[in-house]
Image: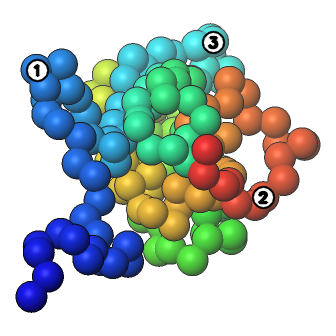
Amino acid sequence: MAAVGSDIRPEIARLPVQAVTSENSYEPPDNFLEIEVVNPITHGLGGNRYTDYEVRTRTKLPVFRLKDSSVRRRYSDFEWLRKELERDSKIVVPNLPGKAWQRQIPAFLRNNDGLFDDDFIEDRRKGLEEFIIKVAGHPLAQNERSLHVFLQEEKIDHDRYAPGKVRNG
């Protein structure tokens, strides 16, 4: 009988294990992905008002070029991402929070700030965060160029954007 370990076939050999030390025991795992939608800011006056949100991404996934990024996105940017993923990917894309049509009626006919009411903005922020966490957590979506542009590019250039896949590293 052969000694244990003397005839290990490469196809069944164990992967090397990195020793756990006090420096690395609390590091995020290699598949770490954290996304937050935070800091809503309303810009403009009158009919030109809009709210955008900071989308912060931290990851150790090799498919992402940047390991830490922060971009500002409007609701319409989330709509663009959803449309691109529905067209190009093979995943079921979750719904976005609703458009809130009743909040868009003229100000003199309603008793709140409409789309710019603090409670509405916070509810929408939570819904957008839930949407992007679900989308970005899907392994097939992680290879879509639209997701990378949305999470890591300062501006979404609709004229220059070309759909496609992203390769690791």
Mark drawn on residue 22: 1
Task: Tell me the residue at 25%/65% (across/down).
Answer: 14
- Identify the element where label 1 is drawn: loop
Left or right: residue 128 versus residue 74 is left
Q: Position of residue 58 (x, y in %)?
A: 40, 30
Q: Nearer the viewer, residue 13 or 6?
A: 6
Distance from the alpha carbon under mark 2 to that under mark 3: 32 Å
> Which residue, given by chain and number where applicable, does mark 3 sit on?
44
The image shows residue 52 at horizontal and vertical percentages of: 53, 25
Question: The N terminus is located in which quarter?
Answer: bottom left
Mark 3 to mark 1: distance in Å? 50 Å
Q: Amino acid at mark 3?
A: Gly
- Badge number at residue 163: 2
Tell us which disc is closer to us: 2 or 3: 2
- The answer to which of 28 and 17 lies nearer the viewer is 17
If you read the primary sequence from the N terminus, does the residue marked by circle 1 or circle 2 appear first? 1
Q: Are marks 1 and 2 in contact (CB under 8 Å)?
A: no
Quarter of the picture containing the C terminus is top right
Q: Residues within 10 Å of mark 3 (few under 14, many from 20)?
A: few
Q: Is residue 18 left or right of residue 114?
A: left
Q: Secondary structure at mark 2?
A: loop
